[in-house]
Image (spheres, rainbow, N blue to C red):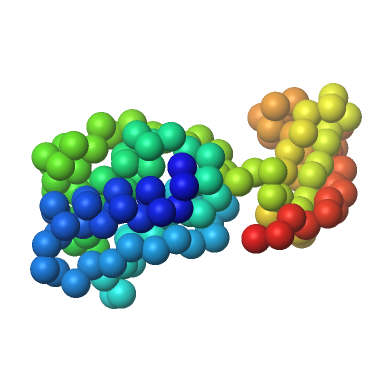
Amino acid sequence: MLAADVTRLAEALLSAHLPGRGWSFGFDRAVRRAGACHHGERRITVSRHLAERAEEDEVRQVLLHEVAHALAGHRAAHGPRWRATAARIGYTGSRLHDGPVAEERATWVGSCPAGHEHRRFRRPTREVSCGLCSHRFSRAALITWRRTAALPN
């Protein structure tokens, strides 16, 4: 989706659900999450990386998720009050992302002896074994890490 389209959608949702309350919208550079609700700043953000590759409905659901946080309040977290608010404004409740939003931007790529690929955004600081090969730490399934060329933000 184009940034201008995401901005228009976000502003329309803010006007519909939070009129006159001083909430604003912006993009962030998050690579592990899709959106965020910043209560102290009264600001909702969406990952620029997500917005670049997502369909309109997916972005709408992320925005509705965050608007529900704004409406329900910080203390509601993902509890019953937040869930009721989210359902009332049209959030479907489905988890949209199971992994990082921009995994290809990870600067560390690892592989286990079986060839499973693993990605990290930060340099691994300890030995890690492959969870696909062994459910417990196993030296036989150690991941070997290498740094990749960093992509521009």
Q: What residue appears at the point 24 percent right and 63 percent down from the top-left corner?
A: 74
Q: Position of residue 105 (x, y in %)?
A: 69, 50
Q: Is residue 15 left or right of residue 96?
A: left
Residue 116 or residue 142, whichever sits in front: 116
Residue 42 appears in the rendering: yes
From this view, report whether residue 120 is shown above or below residue 141.
Answer: below
Q: Is residue 128 left or right of residue 34?
A: right
Residue 87 or residue 21, whichever sits in front: 21
User: How many numbered marks does the figure carry?
Assistant: 0
Q: What residue appears at the point 78 percent right and 57 percent down from the top-left corner?
A: 150
Residue 39 appears in the rendering: no
**Location of residue 153 by image quarter:** bottom right
**Location of residue 14 by image quarter:** bottom left
Residue 149 or residue 84, whichever sits in front: 149
Q: Residue furthest bottom?
A: 40
Q: What residue appears at the point 34 percent right and 34 percent down from the top-left corner?
A: 57
Q: What residue appears at the point 83 percent right and 51 percent down from the top-left corner?
A: 148
Q: Position of residue 19 (x, y in %)?
A: 11, 62
From this view, report whether residue 26 is shown above or below residue 22.
Answer: above
Q: Position of residue 45 (x, y in %)?
A: 39, 60
